[in-house]
Image (spheres, rainbow, N blue to C red):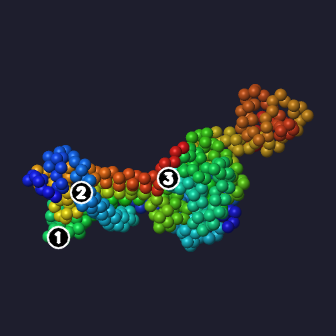
Protein backbone atom coordinates (compact mmCIF):
# COMPACT_ATOMS: atom_id res chain seq x y z
CA UNK A 1 0.00 0.00 0.00
CA UNK A 2 1.83 3.07 -1.11
CA UNK A 3 -1.07 5.45 -0.65
CA UNK A 4 0.14 7.75 -3.38
CA UNK A 5 -3.23 9.36 -3.88
CA UNK A 6 -5.23 11.23 -1.31
CA UNK A 7 -8.49 10.12 -2.83
CA UNK A 8 -8.09 6.38 -2.55
CA UNK A 9 -5.74 5.72 0.27
CA UNK A 10 -6.47 2.08 0.97
CA UNK A 11 -6.66 0.27 -2.30
CA UNK A 12 -3.52 -1.48 -3.31
CA UNK A 13 -0.49 -0.51 -5.24
CA UNK A 14 -2.34 2.22 -6.97
CA UNK A 15 -1.64 1.57 -10.60
CA UNK A 16 -3.15 4.12 -12.91
CA UNK A 17 -6.39 2.21 -13.16
CA UNK A 18 -6.83 2.22 -9.41
CA UNK A 19 -5.63 5.69 -8.72
CA UNK A 20 -7.76 7.02 -11.55
CA UNK A 21 -10.76 5.04 -10.24
CA UNK A 22 -11.51 3.63 -13.66
CA UNK A 23 -14.69 1.64 -14.19
CA UNK A 24 -13.20 -1.77 -13.48
CA UNK A 25 -9.62 -2.76 -12.58
CA UNK A 26 -8.83 -6.47 -12.98
CA UNK A 27 -5.47 -5.93 -11.36
CA UNK A 28 -7.09 -4.80 -8.13
CA UNK A 29 -9.46 -7.76 -8.10
CA UNK A 30 -6.53 -10.17 -8.51
CA UNK A 31 -4.47 -8.47 -5.82
CA UNK A 32 -7.27 -8.36 -3.29
CA UNK A 33 -8.95 -11.69 -3.93
CA UNK A 34 -6.96 -13.24 -1.12
CA UNK A 35 -7.42 -10.55 1.53
CA UNK A 36 -10.77 -9.01 0.68
CA UNK A 37 -13.04 -10.57 -1.94
CA UNK A 38 -12.38 -14.25 -1.32
CA UNK A 39 -13.01 -14.13 2.44
CA UNK A 40 -16.02 -11.88 1.91
CA UNK A 41 -17.49 -14.34 -0.58
CA UNK A 42 -16.91 -17.25 1.77
CA UNK A 43 -18.47 -15.33 4.69
CA UNK A 44 -21.41 -14.54 2.46
CA UNK A 45 -21.90 -18.21 1.70
CA UNK A 46 -21.79 -18.88 5.43
CA UNK A 47 -24.31 -16.16 6.24
CA UNK A 48 -26.67 -17.51 3.63
CA UNK A 49 -26.32 -21.20 4.43
CA UNK A 50 -26.76 -20.66 8.17
CA UNK A 51 -29.84 -18.50 7.61
CA UNK A 52 -31.52 -20.89 5.16
CA UNK A 53 -30.70 -24.02 7.14
CA UNK A 54 -32.01 -22.58 10.41
CA UNK A 55 -34.97 -21.02 8.58
CA UNK A 56 -35.83 -24.39 7.05
CA UNK A 57 -35.39 -26.15 10.39
CA UNK A 58 -38.00 -23.78 11.85
CA UNK A 59 -40.34 -23.50 8.86
CA UNK A 60 -40.56 -27.23 8.17
CA UNK A 61 -41.99 -28.39 11.51
CA UNK A 62 -44.26 -25.34 11.60
CA UNK A 63 -45.53 -26.27 8.13
CA UNK A 64 -46.11 -29.87 9.24
CA UNK A 65 -48.11 -28.57 12.19
CA UNK A 66 -50.10 -26.18 9.99
CA UNK A 67 -50.76 -29.03 7.57
CA UNK A 68 -51.99 -31.29 10.35
CA UNK A 69 -53.95 -28.61 12.23
CA UNK A 70 -55.32 -26.31 9.60
CA UNK A 71 -56.32 -23.54 11.96
CA UNK A 72 -52.64 -22.94 12.78
CA UNK A 73 -51.81 -21.95 9.24
CA UNK A 74 -53.18 -18.41 9.41
CA UNK A 75 -51.46 -17.32 12.62
CA UNK A 76 -48.15 -18.88 11.53
CA UNK A 77 -48.41 -17.34 8.08
CA UNK A 78 -49.31 -13.93 9.47
CA UNK A 79 -46.43 -14.02 11.92
CA UNK A 80 -43.84 -14.84 9.29
CA UNK A 81 -45.26 -12.22 6.94
CA UNK A 82 -45.12 -9.63 9.73
CA UNK A 83 -41.36 -10.11 10.12
CA UNK A 84 -41.00 -9.55 6.40
CA UNK A 85 -42.78 -6.21 6.48
CA UNK A 86 -40.14 -4.72 8.77
CA UNK A 87 -37.49 -3.04 6.58
CA UNK A 88 -34.27 -4.97 6.91
CA UNK A 89 -32.11 -2.04 7.94
CA UNK A 90 -34.59 -1.17 10.65
CA UNK A 91 -34.81 -4.76 11.80
CA UNK A 92 -31.05 -4.98 12.22
CA UNK A 93 -31.07 -1.79 14.28
CA UNK A 94 -33.94 -3.02 16.38
CA UNK A 95 -32.01 -6.13 17.28
CA UNK A 96 -28.68 -4.47 18.05
CA UNK A 97 -29.63 -3.38 21.59
CA UNK A 98 -30.37 -7.03 22.43
CA UNK A 99 -27.78 -8.99 20.54
CA UNK A 100 -25.18 -6.40 19.70
CA UNK A 101 -23.22 -5.99 16.48
CA UNK A 102 -22.83 -9.70 16.05
CA UNK A 103 -23.42 -12.55 13.68
CA UNK A 104 -26.39 -13.53 15.84
CA UNK A 105 -28.12 -10.25 15.08
CA UNK A 106 -27.63 -10.74 11.38
CA UNK A 107 -28.80 -14.33 11.44
CA UNK A 108 -31.91 -13.63 13.50
CA UNK A 109 -33.01 -11.13 10.90
CA UNK A 110 -32.06 -13.29 7.92
CA UNK A 111 -33.78 -16.34 9.38
CA UNK A 112 -36.90 -14.26 9.97
CA UNK A 113 -36.95 -13.32 6.31
CA UNK A 114 -36.49 -16.89 5.08
CA UNK A 115 -39.54 -18.02 7.08
CA UNK A 116 -41.96 -16.03 4.98
CA UNK A 117 -40.61 -17.65 1.83
CA UNK A 118 -40.25 -21.17 3.15
CA UNK A 119 -43.32 -21.64 5.34
CA UNK A 120 -46.08 -20.98 2.76
CA UNK A 121 -44.25 -22.94 0.09
CA UNK A 122 -43.84 -26.00 2.28
CA UNK A 123 -47.48 -25.84 3.35
CA UNK A 124 -48.61 -25.48 -0.27
CA UNK A 125 -46.36 -28.39 -1.21
CA UNK A 126 -47.82 -30.64 1.45
CA UNK A 127 -51.27 -29.82 0.10
CA UNK A 128 -50.35 -30.50 -3.50
CA UNK A 129 -51.43 -34.14 -3.26
CA UNK A 130 -54.93 -34.17 -4.76
CA UNK A 131 -57.95 -35.34 -2.79
CA UNK A 132 -58.28 -38.40 -5.04
CA UNK A 133 -54.74 -39.46 -4.31
CA UNK A 134 -55.28 -39.07 -0.57
CA UNK A 135 -58.60 -40.93 -0.73
CA UNK A 136 -57.04 -43.79 -2.66
CA UNK A 137 -54.21 -43.93 -0.14
CA UNK A 138 -56.61 -44.04 2.81
CA UNK A 139 -58.77 -46.61 1.07
CA UNK A 140 -55.76 -48.87 0.61
CA UNK A 141 -55.01 -48.73 4.31
CA UNK A 142 -52.09 -46.31 4.52
CA UNK A 143 -51.93 -44.73 7.95
CA UNK A 144 -51.82 -40.95 8.33
CA UNK A 145 -48.08 -41.15 8.91
CA UNK A 146 -47.54 -43.34 5.86
CA UNK A 147 -49.58 -40.92 3.76
CA UNK A 148 -47.37 -38.07 4.96
CA UNK A 149 -44.08 -39.88 4.41
CA UNK A 150 -44.85 -41.77 1.22
CA UNK A 151 -47.27 -39.50 -0.56
CA UNK A 152 -47.49 -35.93 0.71
CA UNK A 153 -43.80 -35.29 1.37
CA UNK A 154 -42.50 -36.63 -1.94
CA UNK A 155 -45.16 -34.65 -3.78
CA UNK A 156 -44.18 -31.54 -1.80
CA UNK A 157 -40.55 -31.65 -2.95
CA UNK A 158 -41.01 -29.43 -6.03
CA UNK A 159 -42.73 -26.70 -4.01
CA UNK A 160 -40.21 -27.00 -1.18
CA UNK A 161 -37.31 -26.59 -3.59
CA UNK A 162 -39.17 -23.66 -5.14
CA UNK A 163 -39.34 -22.05 -1.71
CA UNK A 164 -35.66 -22.75 -1.07
CA UNK A 165 -34.72 -21.09 -4.36
CA UNK A 166 -36.53 -17.89 -3.43
CA UNK A 167 -35.15 -18.01 0.12
CA UNK A 168 -31.55 -18.54 -1.02
CA UNK A 169 -31.61 -15.86 -3.69
CA UNK A 170 -33.21 -13.28 -1.40
CA UNK A 171 -30.92 -14.14 1.50
CA UNK A 172 -27.88 -13.62 -0.70
CA UNK A 173 -29.25 -10.17 -1.53
CA UNK A 174 -30.32 -9.22 1.99
CA UNK A 175 -27.04 -10.44 3.48
CA UNK A 176 -25.17 -7.65 1.69
CA UNK A 177 -27.11 -5.18 3.81
CA UNK A 178 -26.00 -7.05 6.91
CA UNK A 179 -22.39 -6.37 5.98
CA UNK A 180 -23.09 -2.68 5.77
CA UNK A 181 -24.31 -1.72 9.15
CA UNK A 182 -24.01 -4.60 11.58
CA UNK A 183 -20.97 -6.78 11.07
CA UNK A 184 -18.03 -6.60 8.74
CA UNK A 185 -19.04 -9.90 7.21
CA UNK A 186 -19.97 -10.84 3.69
CA UNK A 187 -19.87 -9.11 0.35
CA UNK A 188 -21.69 -6.12 1.78
CA UNK A 189 -18.64 -5.06 3.71
CA UNK A 190 -16.27 -4.30 0.77
CA UNK A 191 -19.11 -2.37 -0.84
CA UNK A 192 -19.63 -0.45 2.38
CA UNK A 193 -15.93 0.32 2.76
CA UNK A 194 -15.69 1.52 -0.82
CA UNK A 195 -18.74 3.72 -0.38
CA UNK A 196 -17.28 5.20 2.78
CA UNK A 197 -14.31 6.61 0.86
CA UNK A 198 -14.57 10.25 -0.08
CA UNK A 199 -14.81 9.02 -3.65
CA UNK A 200 -16.42 5.59 -3.81
CA UNK A 201 -14.05 3.08 -5.39
CA UNK A 202 -15.90 1.62 -8.33
CA UNK A 203 -13.96 -1.60 -8.85
CA UNK A 204 -14.54 -2.78 -5.32
CA UNK A 205 -18.26 -2.04 -5.46
CA UNK A 206 -18.69 -3.74 -8.81
CA UNK A 207 -16.62 -6.81 -8.07
CA UNK A 208 -18.34 -7.49 -4.75
CA UNK A 209 -21.74 -6.81 -6.32
CA UNK A 210 -21.02 -9.13 -9.23
CA UNK A 211 -19.87 -11.84 -6.84
CA UNK A 212 -23.18 -11.57 -4.96
CA UNK A 213 -25.09 -11.93 -8.22
CA UNK A 214 -22.94 -14.89 -9.27
CA UNK A 215 -23.43 -16.51 -5.89
CA UNK A 216 -27.21 -16.15 -6.12
CA UNK A 217 -27.26 -17.55 -9.65
CA UNK A 218 -24.95 -20.42 -8.77
CA UNK A 219 -27.00 -21.43 -5.74
CA UNK A 220 -30.19 -21.24 -7.80
CA UNK A 221 -28.73 -23.44 -10.53
CA UNK A 222 -27.62 -25.95 -7.92
CA UNK A 223 -31.16 -26.16 -6.53
CA UNK A 224 -32.61 -26.55 -10.03
CA UNK A 225 -30.21 -29.43 -10.61
CA UNK A 226 -31.22 -31.04 -7.31
CA UNK A 227 -34.86 -30.69 -8.28
CA UNK A 228 -34.26 -32.43 -11.57
CA UNK A 229 -32.79 -35.49 -9.94
CA UNK A 230 -35.12 -35.50 -6.92
CA UNK A 231 -38.32 -35.23 -8.93
CA UNK A 232 -38.02 -37.66 -11.83
CA UNK A 233 -41.77 -37.99 -12.34
CA UNK A 234 -42.26 -34.43 -13.59
CA UNK A 235 -39.70 -34.98 -16.31
CA UNK A 236 -41.35 -38.10 -17.68
CA UNK A 237 -43.08 -37.42 -20.95
CA UNK A 238 -45.46 -39.57 -22.92
CA UNK B 1 -57.45 -65.08 2.40
CA UNK B 2 -60.61 -66.55 0.88
CA UNK B 3 -61.16 -65.91 -2.82
CA UNK B 4 -64.40 -64.03 -2.24
CA UNK B 5 -66.19 -62.54 0.73
CA UNK B 6 -69.83 -62.28 1.70
CA UNK B 7 -70.93 -58.77 2.66
CA UNK B 8 -73.95 -58.04 4.82
CA UNK B 9 -75.47 -54.63 5.50
CA UNK B 10 -77.63 -55.02 8.58
CA UNK B 11 -80.02 -52.07 9.18
CA UNK B 12 -77.32 -49.49 8.43
CA UNK B 13 -78.23 -45.83 8.77
CA UNK B 14 -76.16 -42.73 8.15
CA UNK B 15 -77.20 -39.12 8.58
CA UNK B 16 -75.01 -36.16 7.70
CA UNK B 17 -75.23 -33.30 10.13
CA UNK B 18 -77.49 -30.50 9.07
CA UNK B 19 -79.43 -32.53 6.51
CA UNK B 20 -83.06 -33.42 6.86
CA UNK B 21 -83.09 -36.76 5.13
CA UNK B 22 -80.77 -39.66 5.80
CA UNK B 23 -77.92 -40.42 3.39
CA UNK B 24 -78.49 -44.13 3.91
CA UNK B 25 -81.70 -45.19 5.61
CA UNK B 26 -81.95 -48.55 7.36
CA UNK B 27 -80.15 -50.40 4.58
CA UNK B 28 -80.17 -54.17 4.75
CA UNK B 29 -78.48 -56.06 1.96
CA UNK B 30 -76.88 -59.47 1.64
CA UNK B 31 -74.24 -59.71 -1.03
CA UNK B 32 -73.28 -63.34 -1.62
CA UNK B 33 -69.61 -64.24 -1.92
CA UNK B 34 -68.38 -63.99 -5.49
CA UNK B 35 -71.25 -61.90 -6.78
CA UNK B 36 -71.06 -58.69 -8.76
CA UNK B 37 -73.38 -56.32 -6.94
CA UNK B 38 -74.17 -52.93 -8.46
CA UNK B 39 -75.45 -50.07 -6.32
CA UNK B 40 -77.36 -47.76 -8.62
CA UNK B 41 -79.68 -44.81 -8.24
CA UNK B 42 -80.05 -41.09 -8.72
CA UNK B 43 -77.68 -38.71 -6.95
CA UNK B 44 -78.68 -38.35 -3.32
CA UNK B 45 -79.45 -42.04 -3.17
CA UNK B 46 -76.50 -42.73 -0.89
CA UNK B 47 -74.86 -45.32 -3.10
CA UNK B 48 -71.33 -43.91 -2.76
CA UNK B 49 -71.91 -43.37 0.95
CA UNK B 50 -72.97 -47.00 1.31
CA UNK B 51 -69.88 -48.15 -0.58
CA UNK B 52 -67.46 -46.08 1.49
CA UNK B 53 -68.96 -47.41 4.70
CA UNK B 54 -67.60 -50.83 3.84
CA UNK B 55 -63.96 -49.72 4.08
CA UNK B 56 -64.88 -47.22 6.78
CA UNK B 57 -63.97 -44.12 4.83
CA UNK B 58 -67.39 -42.94 5.99
CA UNK B 59 -68.60 -43.83 9.48
CA UNK B 60 -72.25 -44.74 10.00
CA UNK B 61 -74.61 -44.04 12.87
CA UNK B 62 -76.33 -47.34 13.49
CA UNK B 63 -76.53 -50.88 12.23
CA UNK B 64 -73.75 -53.23 11.34
CA UNK B 65 -71.74 -54.24 8.29
CA UNK B 66 -70.21 -57.71 8.27
CA UNK B 67 -67.63 -59.21 5.94
CA UNK B 68 -67.72 -63.00 6.14
CA UNK B 69 -69.57 -62.67 9.40
CA UNK B 70 -67.05 -60.30 10.99
CA UNK B 71 -68.22 -56.88 12.08
CA UNK B 72 -66.07 -54.35 10.21
CA UNK B 73 -66.00 -52.02 13.20
CA UNK B 74 -64.24 -54.66 15.23
CA UNK B 75 -61.43 -55.12 12.71
CA UNK B 76 -58.30 -52.96 12.88
CA UNK B 77 -58.79 -50.19 10.32
CA UNK B 78 -55.61 -50.74 8.32
CA UNK B 79 -56.11 -54.50 8.23
CA UNK B 80 -59.70 -54.04 7.00
CA UNK B 81 -58.66 -51.65 4.23
CA UNK B 82 -55.65 -53.62 3.08
CA UNK B 83 -57.95 -56.57 2.58
CA UNK B 84 -60.31 -54.64 0.31
CA UNK B 85 -59.48 -53.46 -3.21
CA UNK B 86 -60.60 -49.88 -3.76
CA UNK B 87 -61.09 -48.23 -7.16
CA UNK B 88 -62.42 -44.69 -7.61
CA UNK B 89 -63.52 -42.67 -10.62
CA UNK B 90 -60.61 -40.23 -10.36
CA UNK B 91 -58.29 -43.23 -9.97
CA UNK B 92 -55.91 -41.49 -7.57
CA UNK B 93 -52.67 -43.02 -8.80
CA UNK B 94 -49.60 -41.71 -6.99
CA UNK B 95 -48.01 -39.37 -9.53
CA UNK B 96 -44.53 -39.68 -8.03
CA UNK B 97 -44.45 -43.46 -8.20
CA UNK B 98 -43.96 -45.63 -11.25
CA UNK B 99 -46.81 -47.85 -12.42
CA UNK B 100 -45.06 -50.84 -10.87
CA UNK B 101 -44.69 -49.05 -7.52
CA UNK B 102 -48.30 -47.92 -7.65
CA UNK B 103 -49.52 -51.47 -8.17
CA UNK B 104 -47.29 -52.78 -5.40
CA UNK B 105 -48.62 -50.27 -2.82
CA UNK B 106 -50.53 -52.74 -0.66
CA UNK B 107 -48.03 -55.63 -1.11
CA UNK B 108 -45.36 -53.23 0.11
CA UNK B 109 -47.47 -52.28 3.14
CA UNK B 110 -47.89 -55.97 3.82
CA UNK B 111 -44.11 -56.40 3.73
CA UNK B 112 -43.76 -58.59 0.66
CA UNK B 113 -40.27 -59.21 -0.71
CA UNK B 114 -39.23 -56.81 -3.49
CA UNK B 115 -38.93 -59.70 -5.90
CA UNK B 116 -42.47 -60.87 -5.18
CA UNK B 117 -43.81 -57.31 -5.48
CA UNK B 118 -42.24 -56.96 -8.91
CA UNK B 119 -43.49 -60.31 -10.09
CA UNK B 120 -47.00 -59.49 -8.92
CA UNK B 121 -46.96 -56.10 -10.70
CA UNK B 122 -45.93 -57.74 -13.95
CA UNK B 123 -48.59 -60.41 -13.61
CA UNK B 124 -51.32 -57.84 -12.93
CA UNK B 125 -50.27 -55.55 -15.77
CA UNK B 126 -50.81 -58.48 -18.07
CA UNK B 127 -54.13 -59.35 -16.45
CA UNK B 128 -55.51 -55.83 -17.04
CA UNK B 129 -54.22 -55.71 -20.61
CA UNK B 130 -51.11 -53.58 -20.23
CA UNK B 131 -47.51 -54.28 -21.09
CA UNK B 132 -45.10 -55.49 -18.39
CA UNK B 133 -42.68 -52.79 -19.61
CA UNK B 134 -45.22 -50.14 -18.52
CA UNK B 135 -44.15 -50.88 -14.93
CA UNK B 136 -41.35 -48.35 -15.22
CA UNK B 137 -43.44 -45.51 -16.59
CA UNK B 138 -45.16 -42.79 -14.58
CA UNK B 139 -48.94 -42.23 -14.45
CA UNK B 140 -48.60 -38.97 -16.40
CA UNK B 141 -47.37 -41.00 -19.34
CA UNK B 142 -50.55 -43.07 -19.64
CA UNK B 143 -53.98 -42.37 -21.15
CA UNK B 144 -57.09 -42.22 -18.98
CA UNK B 145 -58.13 -45.74 -19.88
CA UNK B 146 -54.66 -47.12 -19.19
CA UNK B 147 -54.60 -45.34 -15.85
CA UNK B 148 -57.86 -46.91 -14.78
CA UNK B 149 -56.47 -50.30 -15.77
CA UNK B 150 -53.57 -49.56 -13.43
CA UNK B 151 -56.07 -48.49 -10.76
CA UNK B 152 -57.77 -51.86 -11.11
CA UNK B 153 -54.45 -53.72 -11.03
CA UNK B 154 -53.47 -51.81 -7.88
CA UNK B 155 -56.75 -52.78 -6.21
CA UNK B 156 -56.17 -56.44 -7.07
CA UNK B 157 -52.53 -56.49 -6.00
CA UNK B 158 -52.83 -58.27 -2.67
CA UNK B 159 -55.57 -60.55 -3.99
CA UNK B 160 -58.35 -59.14 -1.77
CA UNK B 161 -61.60 -61.11 -1.53
CA UNK B 162 -63.61 -57.91 -2.08
CA UNK B 163 -63.39 -55.02 -4.53
CA UNK B 164 -65.15 -51.70 -4.01
CA UNK B 165 -65.52 -49.69 -7.20
CA UNK B 166 -66.92 -46.16 -7.14
CA UNK B 167 -68.03 -45.17 -10.66
CA UNK B 168 -64.71 -46.45 -11.97
CA UNK B 169 -65.49 -45.84 -15.63
CA UNK B 170 -67.46 -42.62 -15.22
CA UNK B 171 -64.72 -40.35 -16.55
CA UNK B 172 -63.77 -42.43 -19.58
CA UNK B 173 -64.84 -41.97 -23.18
CA UNK B 174 -67.63 -44.33 -24.30
CA UNK B 175 -65.41 -46.67 -26.33
CA UNK B 176 -62.79 -47.12 -23.62
CA UNK B 177 -65.56 -47.40 -21.08
CA UNK B 178 -67.31 -50.20 -22.97
CA UNK B 179 -64.05 -52.06 -23.43
CA UNK B 180 -63.22 -51.85 -19.73
CA UNK B 181 -66.75 -52.93 -18.78
CA UNK B 182 -66.41 -56.03 -20.90
CA UNK B 183 -62.99 -56.77 -19.48
CA UNK B 184 -64.13 -56.28 -15.92
CA UNK B 185 -66.93 -58.81 -16.47
CA UNK B 186 -64.38 -61.28 -17.81
CA UNK B 187 -62.04 -60.52 -14.93
CA UNK B 188 -64.83 -61.08 -12.44
CA UNK B 189 -65.51 -64.49 -13.95
CA UNK B 190 -61.81 -65.35 -13.87
CA UNK B 191 -60.81 -64.13 -10.43
CA UNK B 192 -64.14 -64.80 -8.72
CA UNK B 193 -64.06 -61.96 -6.21
CA UNK B 194 -67.01 -60.18 -4.69
CA UNK B 195 -67.40 -56.80 -6.34
CA UNK B 196 -69.51 -53.90 -5.12
CA UNK B 197 -69.80 -51.41 -7.95
CA UNK B 198 -71.42 -47.97 -7.79
CA UNK B 199 -72.87 -46.26 -10.83
CA UNK B 200 -75.66 -43.82 -11.62
CA UNK B 201 -76.08 -45.41 -15.05
CA UNK B 202 -78.80 -48.08 -15.13
CA UNK B 203 -77.51 -49.46 -18.45
CA UNK B 204 -74.11 -50.06 -16.89
CA UNK B 205 -75.80 -51.63 -13.86
CA UNK B 206 -77.78 -54.04 -16.01
CA UNK B 207 -74.79 -54.92 -18.13
CA UNK B 208 -72.39 -55.46 -15.24
CA UNK B 209 -74.32 -56.77 -12.27
CA UNK B 210 -75.42 -60.23 -11.15
CA UNK B 211 -77.45 -58.33 -8.61
CA UNK B 212 -78.60 -54.75 -8.59
CA UNK B 213 -79.53 -52.67 -5.57
CA UNK B 214 -81.54 -49.62 -6.58
CA UNK B 215 -81.36 -46.81 -4.02
CA UNK B 216 -83.69 -43.83 -4.13
CA UNK B 217 -83.34 -40.34 -2.67
CA UNK B 218 -82.95 -40.46 1.09
CA UNK B 219 -80.90 -43.63 0.90
CA UNK B 220 -83.83 -46.02 0.82
CA UNK B 221 -83.40 -49.38 -0.88
CA UNK B 222 -86.07 -49.52 -3.58
CA UNK B 223 -85.31 -52.98 -4.95
CA UNK B 224 -82.58 -55.59 -4.74
CA UNK B 225 -82.63 -58.42 -7.22
CA UNK B 226 -81.11 -59.83 -10.39
CA UNK B 227 -81.21 -57.55 -13.46
CA UNK B 228 -83.70 -59.86 -15.15
CA UNK B 229 -86.05 -59.92 -12.16
CA UNK B 230 -85.90 -56.15 -11.77
CA UNK B 231 -86.67 -55.63 -15.46
CA UNK B 232 -89.48 -58.21 -15.32
CA UNK B 233 -91.00 -57.05 -12.06
CA UNK B 234 -90.03 -53.54 -11.00
CA UNK B 235 -91.00 -53.16 -7.35
CA UNK B 236 -92.72 -49.81 -7.76
CA UNK B 237 -93.22 -46.80 -10.01
CA UNK B 238 -89.90 -45.30 -8.98
CA UNK B 239 -88.00 -48.36 -10.12
CA UNK B 240 -90.08 -48.69 -13.29
CA UNK B 241 -89.37 -45.09 -14.16
CA UNK B 242 -85.70 -45.35 -13.26
CA UNK B 243 -85.06 -48.35 -15.49
CA UNK B 244 -86.96 -46.82 -18.40
CA UNK B 245 -89.71 -47.83 -20.80
CA UNK B 246 -87.91 -50.45 -22.89
CA UNK B 247 -87.72 -53.05 -20.13
CA UNK B 248 -88.68 -55.98 -22.35
CA UNK B 249 -85.99 -55.14 -24.87
CA UNK B 250 -83.41 -54.76 -22.11
CA UNK B 251 -84.29 -58.19 -20.81
CA UNK B 252 -83.74 -59.60 -24.28
CA UNK B 253 -80.30 -58.04 -24.24
CA UNK B 254 -79.42 -60.13 -21.17
CA UNK B 255 -79.80 -63.46 -23.03
CA UNK B 256 -78.05 -64.92 -26.03
CA UNK B 257 -79.83 -66.94 -28.68
CA UNK B 258 -77.59 -69.86 -27.70
CA UNK B 259 -79.38 -69.97 -24.34
CA UNK B 260 -82.84 -70.15 -25.88
CA UNK B 261 -84.36 -73.63 -26.25
CA UNK B 262 -84.25 -73.86 -30.03
CA UNK B 263 -86.41 -76.00 -32.22
CA UNK B 264 -84.15 -78.06 -34.33
CA UNK B 265 -85.81 -77.96 -37.70
CA UNK B 266 -84.67 -79.80 -40.73
CA UNK B 267 -85.54 -76.67 -42.66
CA UNK B 268 -83.28 -74.69 -40.34
CA UNK B 269 -81.23 -73.78 -43.32
CA UNK B 270 -82.75 -70.35 -43.36
CA UNK B 271 -80.97 -67.92 -45.62
CA UNK B 272 -79.94 -65.95 -42.61
CA UNK B 273 -78.06 -66.95 -39.50
CA UNK B 274 -76.57 -65.55 -36.33
CA UNK B 275 -73.82 -66.77 -34.02
CA UNK B 276 -75.02 -68.41 -30.82
CA UNK B 277 -73.49 -65.68 -28.62
CA UNK B 278 -75.63 -62.97 -30.24
CA UNK B 279 -78.05 -61.36 -27.78
CA UNK B 280 -81.72 -62.07 -28.37
CA UNK B 281 -82.25 -58.36 -28.66
CA UNK B 282 -79.79 -58.06 -31.53
CA UNK B 283 -81.22 -61.16 -33.19
CA UNK B 284 -84.72 -59.65 -33.09
CA UNK B 285 -83.37 -56.40 -34.45
CA UNK B 286 -81.77 -58.32 -37.33
CA UNK B 287 -85.04 -60.14 -38.06
CA UNK B 288 -86.90 -56.85 -38.20
CA UNK B 289 -84.30 -55.47 -40.52
CA UNK B 290 -84.36 -58.51 -42.81
CA UNK B 291 -88.16 -58.81 -42.63
CA UNK B 292 -87.91 -62.47 -41.68
CA UNK B 293 -89.40 -64.45 -38.80
CA UNK B 294 -86.64 -66.99 -38.39
CA UNK B 295 -82.88 -67.21 -38.16
CA UNK B 296 -80.54 -70.16 -38.12
CA UNK B 297 -78.33 -70.22 -35.02
CA UNK B 298 -74.77 -71.35 -35.57
CA UNK B 299 -71.98 -72.28 -33.25
CA UNK B 300 -69.01 -72.07 -35.55
CA UNK B 301 -70.05 -74.08 -38.60
CA UNK B 302 -72.53 -76.21 -36.73
CA UNK B 303 -76.20 -75.29 -36.98
CA UNK B 304 -77.81 -75.48 -33.54
CA UNK B 305 -81.36 -74.91 -34.72
CA UNK B 306 -83.82 -72.23 -35.67
CA UNK B 307 -84.71 -69.19 -33.67
CA UNK B 308 -88.21 -67.92 -34.40
CA UNK B 309 -89.66 -64.55 -33.59
CA UNK B 310 -92.44 -66.33 -31.71
CA UNK B 311 -89.81 -67.70 -29.30
CA UNK B 312 -89.37 -64.20 -27.93
CA UNK B 313 -92.63 -64.15 -26.02
CA UNK B 314 -91.65 -67.31 -24.13
CA UNK B 315 -88.59 -65.49 -22.81
CA UNK B 316 -90.48 -62.62 -21.23
Q: Secondary structure at mark 1?
A: loop
Is tag 3's residue or tag 1's residue first in the polypeptide sequence? 1
Tell me the residue that label 3 is attached to. A232
Along the line of sight, the residue nearer the viewer: A158 or A31 = A31
Q: Give the quarter of the image for residue A3.
A: bottom left
Q: Nearer the viewer, mark 1 or mark 2?
A: 2
Q: Nearer the viewer, residue B108 or B35?
A: B108
Helix or strand or loop: what does disc 3 sit on?
helix
On the same chain, marks 1 and 2? The answer is yes
* Mark 3 and mark 2 on one chain: yes
Closest to the observer, A209 or A119? A209
Badge 1 sits on which subunit? A
Image position of B312 (left or right of A126): right
Residue B7 in the image, given as x and y percentages of width and height: 63, 63
Q: In the rendered view, would you say B274 is above or below A6?
A: above
Q: Residue at left 31%, top 54%?
A: A215
Q: Chain of mark 3?
A: A
Q: CA distance from mark 3 to mark 1?
A: 46 Å
Residue A59 shows in this picture:
no
- In the displayed structure image, the side of residue A215 where residue B73 appears, left or right: right
Q: Which residue is mark 1?
A: A100
Find residue B49 and report its horizontal and vertical position in percent. Answer: 52, 58
**Chain containing mark 2:** A
Label 2: few (<14), some (14–19) or many (≥20) C-alpha neighbours in 10 Å: some
Do tag 3 and tag 2 residues touch (Cβ < 8 Å)? Answer: no
Q: Secondary structure at mark 2?
A: helix
Residue occupying image coordinates x 23% and y 59%: A36
Marks 1 and 3: in contact by CB < 8 Å?
Answer: no
Q: Sequence-wise, which precedes: disc 1 or disc 2?
A: 2
Could you tell me residue A45's position as x and y percent? 30, 60
Front: mark 3 or 2: 2
N-terminal of the pair, mark 3 or mark 2, is 2
Amino acid sequence: MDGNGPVIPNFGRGDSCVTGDHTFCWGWVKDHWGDTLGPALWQHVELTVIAVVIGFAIAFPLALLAHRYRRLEQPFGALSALVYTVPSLALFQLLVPFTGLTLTTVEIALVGYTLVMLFPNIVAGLRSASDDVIEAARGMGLTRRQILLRVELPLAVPAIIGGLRIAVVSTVAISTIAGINVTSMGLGYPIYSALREPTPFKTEIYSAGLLAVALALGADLLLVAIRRTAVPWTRAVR
Amino acid sequence: MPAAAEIVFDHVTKRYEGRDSAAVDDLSLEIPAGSFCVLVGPSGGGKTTALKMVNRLIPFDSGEIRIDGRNIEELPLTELRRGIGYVIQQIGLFPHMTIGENIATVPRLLGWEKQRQRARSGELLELVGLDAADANRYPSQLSGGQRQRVGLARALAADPPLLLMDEPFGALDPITRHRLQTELRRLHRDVGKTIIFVTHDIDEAIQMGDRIAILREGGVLAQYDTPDAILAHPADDFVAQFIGGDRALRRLALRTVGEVPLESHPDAASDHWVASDTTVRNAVSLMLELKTDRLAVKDGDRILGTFRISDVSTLL
